[in-house]
Image (cartoon, coloured by chain):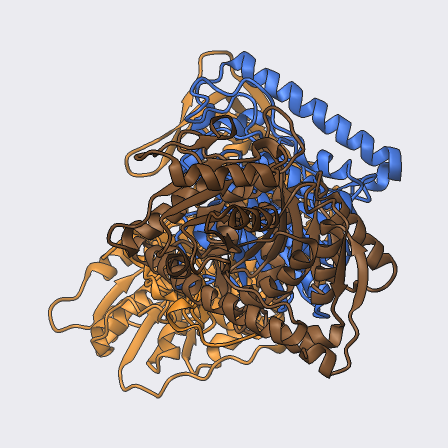
Chain colours: A brown, B orange, C blue
Amino acid sequence: MTAQAALGHRPTRMLLTGDHAVAYGALRAQPHVIPVYPITPQTPVLEKLVELAEAGELRGDLMTVESEHSAMAACIAASLAGARVFTATASQGLALMHEMLHYAAGARAPVVMVNVNRTLASPWGFWADQTDSLAQRDTGWIQLYCESAQEALDTVLHAFRVAEAVLLPAMVVIEAVYVSHTLEPVEVPEPALVARFLPPFTPTLRLDPARPRGVGGTATPAQWRGNRLAMTAAMDRALEEVETAGRLWGGLTGRASAAAEAYRAADAEVLLVTAGSIAGTAREAVDRLREEGIPAGLVRLRLFRPFPAGEVTARLRGARRIAVLDRNCSVGSGGIFAQEVRAALQVALDGPPPVLSYLLGLGGINVSVERVIQVGRDALRRPLPCPGPILEEAL
Amino acid sequence: MSVDLGPARPLGWSEPGRTTLEIPTGGWRTRRPVYVEARAPCAAACPAGEPVPRWVERARQGDYAGAWALVREANPFPAVTGRVCAHPCEAACHRWDHDGAVAVHALERFVGDWGLAHGRPAPPAARRPERVAVVGGGPAGLSCAYHLGRLGYRVTVYERMPALGGLLRYGIPAYRLPRAVLDREIDSVLGLGLEVRTGTAVGRDVPWEALDGYDAVFLAVGAGIPLRLGVPGEHHPAVGDGLAFLRAVNTGSRPAPGGRVVVVGGGSTAMDVARTALRLGARSVTVLALEAREAMPAAPDEVEQALAEGVEIRNGVGVRAFVEKDGCLCGVEVSAATLEQAPDGTVRPVFLPGPSGILETDTTLLAIGQRPDPASLVAAEAGGAGGPVRAAGGDMASGFRTVSHAIGAGAGAARLIHARLAGVPPEAAADLPGWVAARPAHVVTLDEIRLDAFPRAPRCPRPHRAAARPAGFTEVVPGLDEAAAREEARRCFTCGRCVACDVCLLACPDMAIRRVDGGYAVASEYCKGCGLCARECPRGALQMGAER
Amino acid sequence: MIDRLLPGHASCPGCAVALAVRYVLQGLPDRAVLVVPPSCIAVLMGPLPLSSTTLPVLQTAFETAAAAAAGLARAYRALGEDVTVVCLAGDGGTYDIGLQALSGAAERDEDFLYVCFDNEAYQNTGNQKSSATPWGARTTSTPRGKTTRKKEIVEILAAHRIPYAATASPAYRDDLLAKVRRALGLHGTRFLNVTCPCVPGWGIGEDASLRVGRLGVESRAVPLYEVEDGTRYRITHRPAGIPVGDYLRAQSRYAHLTADQVAAIQAEVERRWEDLVERCERVNGPAAVDRAEARVPAS
């Protein structure tokens, strides 16, 4: 029995899209300020927040700024003033924020943002593709990838807890359409339960006239390096905080989570690795592969930054073949998760298993169970070496 | 959540209590601002050596006692000089071209009159044993006696005339200098305990040798010998000496220069003679001056008043001869002339080509200057080693024959005598606070004054009561009332002297100037030496100097 | 008078921006927080871990001063704290890269005072032209003189109908502080453009910035006025109307101008002045031109 049930908390069960679910997540975190700018497919987040504010449920100041860049600038400032801050964006908006993403992390502003993965122009597209958020991997943001509306809601709360604990901004990522606009039954936790999980934000450092200090002045090379190393140390802590939050939330709600989650992975010869909405499809494919007699398993990367190299290595080390499924493409290199997994194993293991890179669902193309099953089969028989990304056409 | 993040803590914040005060930007400086007290042009021009901006500043503050005391540090007769000084200070005033010179002359009279009504003279210093003889009780002699008296010397003043004052009493008419004013300022000097022997001419009533018994002697017997034109007909009885005329009037006679009076000369005495003649019933008075109107030695306001009273002034004309007919003076032959200054300082006409004309006259009075009696000069140079300290001053020793020059000469002689007798340096140390450097040799130039810091304000009007053909000898120029005096004093730029106006303090981009001791100090740790403070100083009291 | 800017900052000697910042800070309440984007003001604020001011400062990205200030103001309001938020930005961060954020904030009437210290070019990076650079001025990116005119930033802000927009000059401190006080008495977006002569950028002496500032104002090249609610114009200082050539000749950035070009600038100055007077009179009648202590500049 969960603490939730034991305490008599009754979560509200609702049929919500991913966008509306994150809006409820934000509602439960009760941010003071929400600077936000609309963009497809994030717009329902904004609209739901407005609705909640109009209904008097959301107390925070919803600030409809004139661009995502200004949204993030306002987020950082408000956060450094000591406010809890939430925002959401997608694609072009995230790209426009890029400068301020670095700024937020360097200034150690624990802003929480939902990004709805969407293709970057040009040409215009409105479908799922993780390249927008993965392209922000070096900005110093914590990144958490969700596969469902429920997880998105939960992860917004996790993100606040982690970000405010380590003073780094955190991005909660869901994919366009597949999560953002897909209705699912979602449990919205009671505020009293959230209060047991997410303490108020009371930073020791803030822009306070009573204790005047400046932030963001010019640094010497040594000072800049020091700040960067401190961010790195904070990222290390973030990994522990993510795991702690996952366990604690599991105790409270029955929905535990981890940085990297395994499914039938222990004895798998071929291990699929993915992040986001493909994970659900992949679980089904794993079951079907096992029925075919192929010992397959899945490792889902929930946390991308900090990259949980140890957890990933521990779960992948026993496999004969590893197949990374990327709904993203670093042009000129290939799947971004694949690169990260290869890099992690390379330094962790003496003779790591081969890591094959599959580009699936680019541009928002649907990824079917059959397609993932093809990957599982292909991975075991693909001649080596095979460095380049393997496209759907090659399966 | 607030926990100590240790090595993961944010480092982009300034540290509490740590400021740029840790950065000594003063190291950038190649020059530094220095607060100075330089000489204002008015003070530099004042023959009596008055610290004009200082006492005007006191008057501005309403501290008339302070103003009066400061004037009298240099000049015992501000009520007199406030009326009769030619006020070269105003000609030198940097405000001249801005909106008119500060009316220092009128302010001095206000302060002097305030002193006569309310002033309490400072008591003299402790009595000294040395005795000093002052020969001549005019402004030079009395000034010297006053300064020495204040220093505690035993001073005896010898005056050949029955009363003290010299030309102030026997030359200047009462409508310019009421006798009550003169008497009271002289009384205030005598209050120092001087011995006065009027009606006693040294060399006539007392032998010159009698002075040998003194420790020092100051000769200031004036210049009593009138200059002559050296033209035909000059010795006609109807060609008189202007100063003698004034002396007669001032000793109570009422000569009646009836008919048409011609006065020769362009100075203050000529104006006095002309206006006195007018008051005594002359039908017409014409002044003949070699100088152009603007170049006349008489003060412009005197000229203006003379004209207003009905005196005719002809400029640029010289006298060629006096014309007699049947033993009577009937005219003055005049023609256009310019003036030439001889190397000895005397002035002579240079006649221009062209016809001469005859100006009809019944009486002509010459007011072209005087020279000292040679006997007094011999006396001044007499004496040898072991005799008393000797000094001479006033009109007998100077070509600058004005009241204020005489007062300044008397004060200078007193300093000299004091230096010799007491062994102190003649230049007293400047009375300045530690944050100000004295620059007495530097006279503030116009480009050191920031005119745009001073809104234009008109000079106080000085109406005079000079009606056409005045009959009496009542004073013609009224004094300023207190409000007008304060207003006028506010116009003073106070050139070369800090008045703590805060302009420098507020003009510093580096907050390197702070208030101290009624003034300012420059924080050398932070001053970058830009010079904005000095450039912005409205009055040249802050100057950039080389970095040490 | 409380100085909230401290000595030891790194401005150039004789910097008018430093002076203007000093004055603005003198006019602020104790509970104020500053927002500073990259600019000469950022240089002033001091290197880490030091600060040159007694107020908290957020140094934000170049184009974000207004957005960051808006975020701060919203945060303090949400936290129930009474804090005055003040942006100190340069002309590059205001007229150019930060205009979008400023316009957005002004439209939303975000609650802060935005002060642009306008030294008419990117002086922090060594004098490249900005849209605040006047016609004819030489910069390192307009070596033959700028060929387009200066952006009318106060008009742009006034067109947003914000409660208060005004111009000011460090050479007229009383006027500047009166405007700061006036602005602080209002709520919403308040804007002040302070024209700051720049020693290296304008080519003037280290001791000349205030004098040149006066020449600019007295020649009407830099009129001092204020606009309330985007419509009520008021000239706050009646200039002497000296020839603009006196102002231009004091700066080496204009040394190349021909007599005809100076005459053209004079005509432009007069046209702008007439336009300003007209705006004042249209709303308030001729009495709009008051608070004008006739100061006469040195020729």
State the residue at coordinates (71%, 22%).
Answer: C271
Q: Looking at the image, is C251 positioned above or below residue A187?
A: above
Determine which quarter of the picture holds residue A268: bottom left
Q: How many marks?
A: 0
Determine which quarter of the picture holds residue C274: top right
Q: Quadrant of the N terminus of chain C?
A: bottom right
Q: Looking at the image, is B276 positioned above or below residue C205?
A: below
Question: Residue A260 at x, y = what percent?
Answer: 49, 59
Task: Report if residue C135 is visible in the image.
Answer: yes
Q: Nearer the viewer, residue B510 or C70?
A: C70
Q: Looking at the image, is B538 positioned above or below residue B191?
A: above
Question: Residue A33 at x, y = what percent?
Answer: 70, 59
Q: Nearer the viewer, residue B372 or B433?
A: B433
State the residue at coordinates (80%, 48%).
Answer: A47
Question: Residue A324 at x, y = what percent?
Answer: 45, 43
Q: Nearer the viewer, residue B38 or B138?
A: B38
Task: Report if residue C198 is visible in the image.
Answer: no
Left or right, B396 with respect to A63, comes to left
State the residue at coordinates (35%, 46%).
Answer: A342
Q: Nearer the viewer, residue A217 or A43?
A: A43
Question: Residue B523 at x, y = what percent?
Answer: 37, 64
Q: Looking at the image, is A232 positioned above or below residue A4?
A: above
Determine which quarter of the picture holds residue A97: top right
State the residue at coordinates (60%, 37%).
Answer: A367
